[in-house]
Image: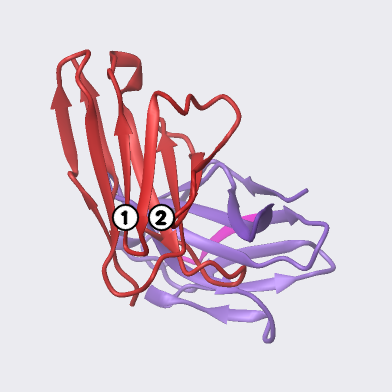
Chain colours: A red, B purple
Amino acid sequence: GAVVSQHPSWVICKSGTSVKIECRSLDFQATTMFWYRQFPKQSLMLMATSNEGSKATYEQGVEKDKFLINHASLTLSTLTVTSAHPEDSSFYICSATSGTDNQPQHFGDGTRLSIL
Amino acid sequence: AQSVTQLGSHVSVSEGALVLLRCNYSSSVPPYLFWYVQYPNQGLQLLLKYTTGATLVKGINGFEAEFKKSETSFHLTKPSAHMSDAAEYFCAVTRYSGAGSYQLTFGKGTKLSVIP
């Protein structure tokens, strides 16, 4: 089945640093990738939609200068949390799809980000 | 606009008992529906999906769901619960977000506990 690899799985860093999270589709071409944020005991909140080779589309309320998304190839998207602060601590999950409406999104295992 | 309602944020069943997780959707177009499972500190794993055709859909781990258009429902069932089924379950419906992208709208999730 389709596999999406997300790295790293856990990050602890100091306030003010930038953190990059990678999302790779290992066995299919992901024309579209999504980045979600999940707060404890809550559902997934879509942050942005990323199509290969174009700028990401951010959901309302998500700071695009804070959360930089790059989708440079059909198998890789990155999310960079710039100048991270404790309120950015969360569980970040990426997903990838081949793009058509009836194809499911395949999810990475998530990244637990803790900002001290 | 699409939306998903999961009735019951927490469901407890005894091991060996029937599992029933409820999902109702709202969609202005024929929906594509999905059930995902999430284990602690992990991403989401696709259980099953409904796109077209047979309304009773079988998924992994013995789960199945039935699409009922008249009731706008897509309830998830499993005849006999196993301890390993304890997890968070999310129902989702696809929605078109423009520019050729399809996004998922998630329900708030149902936590399933299995009592030995």
Q: Indicate whether residue B106 is drawn in magenta.
A: no
- N-terminal-most mark, 1 or 2: 2
- The one nearer the camera, B82 or A22, is A22
Q: Which mark is residue A27?
A: none
- Left or right: residue A14 versus residue A85 is left
Label the magenta part by its dominant secondary structure: strand
Image position, residue A96 (x, y; %): 42, 60
| Quadrant of the rendered image containing residue A39 | top left
Q: Which region shows up in magenta?
A: B17-23
| Residue at mark 1 to residue at mark 2: CA–CA distance | 6 Å
Q: Indicate whether residue B22 is drawn in magenta.
A: yes
Image position, residue A37 (x, y; %): 42, 36
Say which residue label 1 marks.
Answer: A108
- Left or right: residue B64 versus residue A40 is right
- The one nearer the camera, A105 or A84, is A84
Image position, residue A107 (x, y; %): 37, 57
Which residue is depicted at the point 46% across and 64% down?
A: A31
Chain assignment, label 2: A
Which residue is depicted at the point 29% across and 46% down?
A: A110
User: Where A102 sits versus A32, above or below?
Assistant: below
Image position, residue A57 (x, y; %): 55, 41
Residue type pointed to by label 2: Ser
Residue type pointed to by label 1: Gly
Which residue is depicted at the point 78% across and 68% down?
A: B30
Quadrant where the image shows the N terminus of chain A: bottom left
Which residue is depicted at the point 25% across and 41% down?
A: A21
Mark 2 nearby-residue class (10 Å; few <14, some 14–19, many ≥20): many
Say which residue label 2 marks.
Answer: A95
The reply to whether discs 1 and 2 touch (Cβ–Cβ < 8 Å) is yes
**Most distant residue in the front direction:** A53
Q: Secondary structure at mark 2?
A: strand
Residue B86 visible somewhere in the drawing: no
